[in-house]
Image (cartoon, helix red, strand yellow):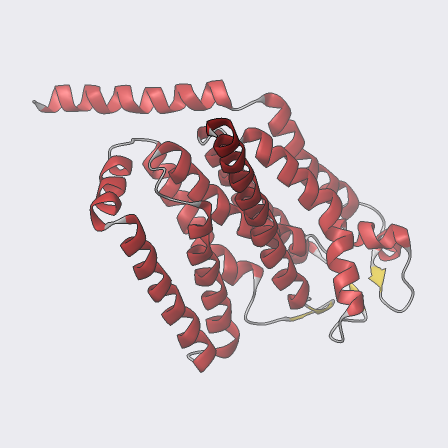
Amino acid sequence: MDLREAFHEMKENYIGFYRELRQGVEFRDLLLMAVVPVVLTGVFLLPKSVQQGLILDFQNVSVFNLFSYGFVHRGPGHYAGNLVSYVTLALPAYLLCVLGQEKRFFRYTWLSFVLLFPPVIALIELASPVSPSTTAGFSGVASAFLGFLAISLVLFLCNRVSKEIQTAHAVVLYLVAAGIVSLTYSGVSGLTIGTFAATMLLVAFYVYRIGVEEVKRVFSDISVMQGHLELVLFAFLFFLASPTMIFPANISRAGGTVDIFAHYLGLTLGFFLPLIYLIYQNTDVERQLNLVKS
């Protein structure tokens, strides 16, 4: 095969990838995801006195503020950081769900994160002994999309590359994110070393369960999927880079202190709740298939 033929084949593969995206991406989904930037920007442009009334005060909790605090920010940097985090995490997660035939799952997840997570995270903080005096910002929900991006990556690999890959394998990615966060705040501590050691042991265990030959086949198959490969790599890079942005080393800000506990809650809930649902769904499907066979 000469260079011209190789280039033509590569071009055809990329055209197929873009065609698949064009057919799978729906305008209503883009509108749905655009709601967050529009609302965050609209609230940010409100008078400061109005914004102040949207912040959640844990000493004087109202039902309205349990939801509104998630969409108000303490300054331009806070607003821009959360907006960038949301876009760079939610968009690749959506594209992976499109290619993995999981659009409906994404929609329900998005609605749950945006509508339910602000009050859920606030109520958990309210019941904890480490709640701040006040809280504001979309960070908790943005952190949830970091957890969901890990689920989306593994779902794509499971649905498009190998059925030997299971959604539970995404725990490896969660541990990677937890290790990066631990490195940020604890340095090279026992917790950090233990987290990364557990990650490596879990990787070795999953490779053993899947089989080395199957793992090689997965890498071989994804390496020739032009467009899909780049999306997976970019999503993985966003996943690795996002913990340092969502969990900043310096938590002191001009408007107060970053509510890191809310970020932890968002990451954990955003990862484990979709994972538990998928495991339950897969178990239920297997149970129904066994009933049909019997």
**Image-quadrant location for residue 31:** top right
Q: Please identify the residue farthest to the front as the structure is shown.
A: 294
Q: Nearer the viewer, residue 174 or 75?
A: 174
Residue in the image at 34% along x and 31% along y = 227
Please provide percent x and percent y for residue 160.
Answer: 37, 32
Left or right, 66 with respect to 35, comes to right
Quadrant of the snapshot with the N terminus: top left
Q: Residue at x 19, y 23 (%)?
A: 7
In the picture, measured across the screen, residue 278 lies left or right of residue 100, that is: right
Q: Is 141 displayed left or right of 271 in the figure?
A: right
Work out whether 103 lies above or below 202. above
Whether residue 87 is visible: no
Establish if 57 lies above or below 154.
below
Q: In the rendered image, which quarter is residue 246 located in?
A: bottom right
Q: Residue at x 43, y 44 (%)?
A: 154
Position in image of residue 137 (x %, y %) = 72, 55
Query: Looking at the picture, does residue 294 appear above or below residue 206?
Result: above
Q: Residue furthest left?
A: 2
Q: Which one is in front, 151 or 118?
A: 151
Q: Does the image show residue 58?
A: yes
| Location of residue 42 in the rendering, given as x and y in whole percent from the top left corner | 77, 41
Count every numbered label the image shows and give the total: 0
